[in-house]
Image: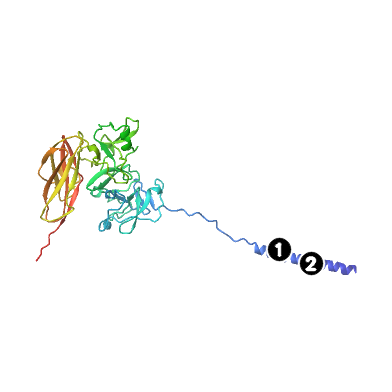
Amino acid sequence: MKRIYLFLVLIGILIIFVLGGCVSQQQTGNQTPVKQTPGQPSIEQPNVKLSTENYIVDDKEKTLYLFTKDAKGDSKCTDACLNIWPIFYREKISVSSGLNSSDFGTITRTDGNKQTTFKGWPLYYFSSDVKPGDIKGEGVNSIWFIARHDYAVFIADKDNLKFIVDAKGNTLYSFNKDQPDVSNCKGGCLKAWPVFYAGNIVAPSIMNNSDFGVITNSEGSRQTTYKKMPLYYYVNDTARGDTNGHGVNDAWFIVEPAAKGLSTPTQNASSAIKVTSFPQSAHSDTVVTIKWEVTGGTEGEISNTAIIWGYNSAGANISEYPKATMIQTGKTPKEFSAGINIPSSGTLYFRIHAVVDGSDIYSPENQVSIIQQTSSY
């Protein structure tokens, strides 16, 4: 009996070991780890970045540009213009160090396409830029400039007026009751005409950064000056590119940018020339009439004024235009007009020149496209 009992006990123990081994093997098989590679966070590559020279390029180092005629924030480059200045657009902007993604936005153009903007200025390429880093579009016609992230001021071109704005397209003004490096806008005046101040001035390349300075006004505020005249905003300019302050009380005026080497007024800094009427295009071998106004806060002596013109863009001073109309004289403010014989083909470029109180002033350069006459039978 004892032998049988011992035999049954041994058999039971053996069964327990066998079953335990199977379970162990089964559990071991189920717990075989699956090798997994820890997920690496994807690093988003910037599609807009800064070049070593501090201008803005895309991810392939192609230079981006701004257009002065886009002062209102919409694109004025349309149709054939886009063949030369293609638009830049990225649905999502990622930027490199030195840039803020919040400075970039998107507009929908009148043709329905979307375009990326920088501080409200639409961005473009230049078709003649072939290699990465090319900047062949810089300064073209004094209206196209590389997009720099550090512009403190820029140039706007609207309604035949060319004037200085801040980096976001807000118009800047001068006050004809100011003196060089002295602001006479005080108290309530400053509520309507807040000061403009930028610590470090970077301007478009056709301007001199050294023409800008800084003063401390009577209220103790720092204020930027241009050619020693204090600069202001106007509270009733509610949108970028607005010029509602121009001519207010015959004392406040937009500020025209002076190109490098261009003579500018020193004795009567508030004098200005506004081209009031001219045709954008004209048939060849005809005479067109151009009208302009010379203004100033006080009655100034206009010793002469005339249209200076030629068939190539000059963009600088009177000596670079080969032709001029008859000289006229008067006192500011006064309107003038003169006729120009349109040649048979090409483009006519012109500026208005005046000497007011012994100082030279110029209008921005304008142009008239020439339409060739066709024979009819």
Check disc 1 and report the residue beneath it.
24
Is residue 335 left or right of 215 when viewed as pictured? left
At label 2, the amino acid type is Leu
Is residue 148 left or right of 29 when viewed as pictured? left
Question: Which residue corresponds to the image point at 82% horizontal and 66% vertical from the top-left?
Answer: 10
- Foreground pick, 159 / 75: 159
Which quarter shows the N terminus?
bottom right
**Picture coordinates of residue 76, whole percent (x, y):** 27, 53
Is residue 41 at least partly visible in the picture?
yes
Cα separation between marks 1 and 2: 15 Å
Question: Which residue corresponds to the image point at 17% horizontal and 43% vertical from the top-left?
Answer: 293
Is residue 303 at least partly visible in the picture?
no
* Sequence-first tag of 1 and 2: 2
Q: Is residue 54 above or below residue 28?
A: above
Is residue 191 left or right of 159 when viewed as pictured? right
Q: Is residue 33 above or below residue 144?
A: below
At label 1, the amino acid type is Ser
Q: Are marks 1 and 2 in contact (CB under 8 Å)?
A: no
Label number found at residue 14: 2
Badge 2 element: helix
Question: Which residue corresponds to the image point at 73% horizontal and 65% vertical from the top-left?
Answer: 21
Which quarter shows the C terminus?
bottom left
Quadrant hosting residue 300: top left
Badge 1 element: helix
Quadrant hosting residue 6: bottom right
**Picture coordinates of residue 178, whole percent (x, y):** 25, 32
